[in-house]
Amino acid sequence: MSPGHRITIEQGTQHVRVVHDGTVLAESRRPLLLRETGLPVRYYLPPDDVRTELLTPSDSRTHCPYKGDASYWSRPGAADLVWAYLDPKPDVAAIKGHFCFYDTEVVTG
């Protein structure tokens, strides 16, 4: 990693939910919290907590020099709504196969 760039991953206990157009796409009480220099905290959700049957694989791919190559999934009217690193770099191996959504809400109460 470049000097000053840092990524940490920890097991969370927050109750997080992803809702798109009134449909719950994911709900988890065991997210991985990924903190990366200069970026907001991201919640990576276990595949068992994501309704993957409601998602369509996308042809989009991106490359992160720190995490590796990301694959994307979409919903009607919401291209590339979620991504995952199917073969992440060793330093972030914990997120392998976990899904990360742009809009994740932390449920309180």
Image: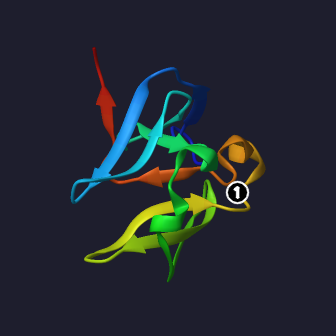
User: Dot 1: few (<14), some (14–19), or many (≥20) neighbours within 10 Å?
Assistant: some
Q: Tell whether 81 sits left or right of 5.
A: left
Q: Is residue 77 visible?
A: yes
Residue 93 position, x and y percent, is 74, 46
Q: In which image quadrant can residue 106 be found?
A: top left
Classify residue 57 as left or right of residue 93: left
**What residue is at 53 percent from the left and 66 percent from the top?**
53
Residue occupying the point 45% across, 66% down:
54
Residue pushed farthest top?
A: 109
Question: What residue is shown with label 1?
Answer: 88
Q: Nearer the viewer, residue 19 or 91?
A: 19
The answer to whether residue 36 is visible is no
For the point 62% across and 55% down, the residue is 67
Which color scheme did the rendering employ for the protein?
rainbow
Viewed as shown, does residue 4 lie left or right of 10?
A: left
Circle 1: residue type: Pro
- Residue 16: image location, x then y, percent: 40, 33
- Relative placement, left or right, of 41 versus 58 is left
89 in relation to 92, above or below: below
How far across and down, in percent of the image, does residue 49 sit? Answer: 55, 44
